[in-house]
Amino acid sequence: MVTTRKKRVAMTEKLKKDVFMACVVRVSREILPYGSFKAVGETHKIHPRTVANLWYSTLKQIPGYQPNTPLDPVSLLANVPETAFTTKFENSGRNPKHDRDMLLQEIKNIDPTARRTIRSLAGAVGIPVMTIWRMKQSKKLKVHTMALKPKLNDDHRLNRLFHCIAKIDKNTINSVAEMTFKSMYNEIHIDEK
């Protein structure tokens, strides 16, 4: 006999509020009657234990609530904090070993030629390559190519300019507004490695 597990329902903030409200509506004679968790769980397609966990964890967050005291639905709804149903986990996980802001300051002080690759940057700072990679993934470290070419001197610039001028079509050179380049269908540029 093969048993299949039910697919787990993602508990959104709205679903948590709806489940808690359904439990509050069922409060009668200042207690939550027997079978309420099961009934609420069936209507929202959640396990009764999940409903119970949500109910008790929300009650613990209400200021001034004491266990085993009579329940007042009006005061329950009025005193539920805003953060009772949040699904965000702000302070979860292990703390980072290296302070990210301090690392960014160290990276700025390193010579640009020593930080061209992730591996060389990690070696210069003295931290693992994965730390640099994670900083890059989390957008704390912006990777960009260098737009300026410091090795390009005046002679090279002049040669590049003459090369571009040589590619202008001589038939269109008289009118500056309609100047075009040659079609260059008879040229092949091969980049040998």
Image (cartoon, helix red, strand yellow):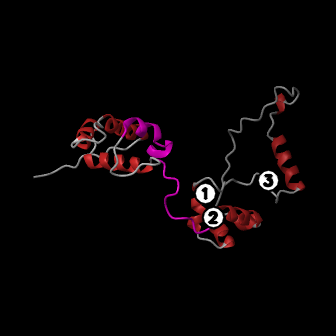
Q: Which mark is residue 118?
A: 2
Element type at marker 1? helix
Q: Position of residue 55 (x, y in %)?
A: 35, 46
- Whether residue 97 appears in magenta in the rendering, the answer is yes
N-term mark: 2 or 3: 2
Q: Residues within 10 Å of mark 2 (few under 14, many from 20)?
A: some
Q: Which mark is residue 20?
A: none
Q: Residue at x 44, y 49 (%)?
A: 61
Q: CA distance from mark 1 to mark 2?
A: 9 Å
N-term mark: 1 or 2: 2
Q: Residue at x 69, y 44 (%)?
A: 187
Q: Nearer the viewer, mark 2 or mark 3?
A: 2
Q: Position of residue 175 (x, y in %)?
A: 87, 26
**What amino acid type should be assigned to the residue bearing mark 2?**
Ile
**What amino acid type should be assigned to the residue bearing mark 1?**
Lys
Residue highlighted by disc 1: 136
Element type at marker 2? helix
- Whether residue 186 appears in magenta in the rendering, the answer is no
Q: CA distance from mark 3 to mark 1?
A: 22 Å
Q: Position of residue 13 (x, y in %)?
A: 43, 40
Identify which residue, 129 or 99, lies in the foreground. Answer: 99
Element type at marker 3? loop
**Which residue ends up furthest to the left in the rendered image?**
1
Q: Residues within 10 Å of mark 1 (few under 14, many from 20)?
A: some
Q: Nearer the viewer, mark 3 or mark 1?
A: 1
Q: Which residues are magenta?
A: 72-98
Q: Quadrant of residue 24?
A: top left
Residue highlighted by disc 3: 148
Q: Is residue 158 above or below residue 167?
A: below
**What amino acid type should be assigned to the residue bearing mark 3?**
Leu
N-term mark: 3 or 1: 1
